[in-house]
Image (cartoon, grey):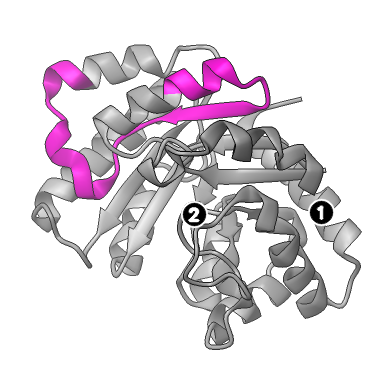
């Protein structure tokens, strides 16, 4: 059984064949998917999907590139959304210094506000961090560590920082990038971090694994990610599949 811990099936790239794609995921062994909120409108579209598909769960939260969507009124709405059925986390939230659609201080403010919301609503967090590794870690350690747990999505930091996140109790999300030839640091992370702290993800429609790199991603490609992690650890794909499924269930508080 495979658990895609981070997907975006509300994305427009799935508009023409979304239902066909989703209904065939079981053929690839995919049993559960968490569809991750991005901006405000994306979040509302995601809610429709998780109501329609029994195997799909969702999150409530605003991506650092879209924090301009937030204000005090919407923060209160977000709190109510956190209490909806099948909402399993606050995310994806964090910092993005690559695109810099909002100033660093604005991103940090809304990041902290949403971390505090997660603690108040007793939900784990899904963390986005791009070109902001140290700031993300420092805020996580100061504001959230030891509380409701969560996952560092599409982990791209150092092995040393990965170990520090594990010490704080977080999971690391590993997806298609681990199959890329130039992803040497991530391969080390996948090989050396305790398996009980790893979940697999797609971030679909983005970051498809080799040999589909550059094409639209899907949860059906996760066996390729699992196979790569297994090879790096010198264990069977079945062991990785089982462990990461159980890890994602624990992460999101699912039976």
In this picture, residue 122 sits left or right of residue 225: left
The reply to whether the C-beta atoms of the residues labelled 2 and 1 are less than 8 Å apart is: no
Q: Is residue 49 above or below residue 235?
A: above
| The magenta stretch spans residue 51 | yes
Which mark, by number, is residue 200? none
Horizontal and vertical percent for residue 24?
71, 39
Percent coordinates x, y for residue 100 in the rendering? 15, 60
Q: Marks 2/1: CA distance?
A: 19 Å
Picture residue at 80% right of the left edge, 43% below the top = 27
Q: Secondary structure at mark 2?
A: strand
Residue 201 belongs to magenta span = no
What crowding class fits label 1: few (fewer than 14 Cα within 10 Å), some (14-19), or many (20 or more)? many
Q: How many marks?
A: 2
Residue at numbered disc 1:
241
Q: Quadrant of residue 19?
A: top right
Q: Is residue 194 visible?
A: no
Whether residue 76 is visible here, answered yes or no, is yes
Q: Which residue corresponds to the image point at 34% horizontal and 22% vertical from the top-left?
A: 44
Q: Earlier in the sequence, mark 2 or mark 1?
A: 2
Q: Nearer the viewer, residue 208 or 197?
A: 208
Q: Which residues, given as a range, are shown in magenta?
A: 47-74
Q: Which residue is mark 2?
A: 152
Q: Is residue 152 above or below residue 235?
A: above
Residue sitting at 58 percent across and 87 percent down? 181
Above or below: residue 133 compared with residue 84: below
Q: Quadrant of the N terminus?
A: top right
Q: Residue at x 32, y 32 (%)?
A: 42
Label 1 sits on a secondary structure element that is helix
Local crowd at mark 2 within 10 Å, few (<14), some, or many (≥20)? Answer: many
> Residue 109 in the image: x percent, y percent?
17, 42
Disc 2 or disc 1, which is closer to the eye? 1
């Amino acid at each position: 059984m495979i658990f895609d811990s981070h997907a975006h099936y509300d994305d427009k790239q799935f508009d023409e064949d979304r239902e066909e794609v989703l209904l065939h995921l079981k053929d690839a062994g995919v049993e559960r998917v968490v569809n991750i909120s991005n901006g405000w409108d994306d979040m509302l579209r995601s809610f429709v999907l998780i109501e329609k598909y029994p195997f799909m769960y969702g999150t409530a939260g605003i991506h650092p590139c879209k924090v301009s969507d937030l204000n005090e009124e919407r923060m209160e709405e977000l709190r109510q959304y956190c209490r909806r059925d099948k909402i399993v986390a606050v995310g994806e939230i964090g910092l993005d210094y690559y695109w810099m659609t909002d100033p660093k201080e604005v991103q940090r403010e809304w990041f902290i506000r949403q971390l505090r919301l997660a603690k108040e609503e007793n939900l784990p967090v899904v963390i986005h961090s791009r070109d902001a590794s140290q700031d993300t870690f420092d805020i996580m350690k100061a504001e959230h560590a030891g509380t409701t747990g969560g996952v560092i999505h599409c982990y791209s930091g150092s092995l040393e920082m990965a170990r520090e996140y594990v010490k704080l109790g977080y999971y690391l999300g590993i997806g298609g990038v681990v199959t890329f030839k130039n992803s040497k640091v991530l391969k080390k992370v996948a090989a050396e971090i305790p398996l009980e702290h790893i979940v697999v993800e797609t971030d679909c429609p983005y970051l498809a694994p080799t040999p589909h790199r550059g094409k639209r991603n899907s949860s059906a490609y996760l066996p390729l990610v699992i196979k790569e992690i297994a090879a790096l650890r010198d264990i069977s794909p079945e062991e990785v599949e089982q462990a990461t499924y159980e890890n994602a269930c624990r992460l999101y508080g699912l039976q």
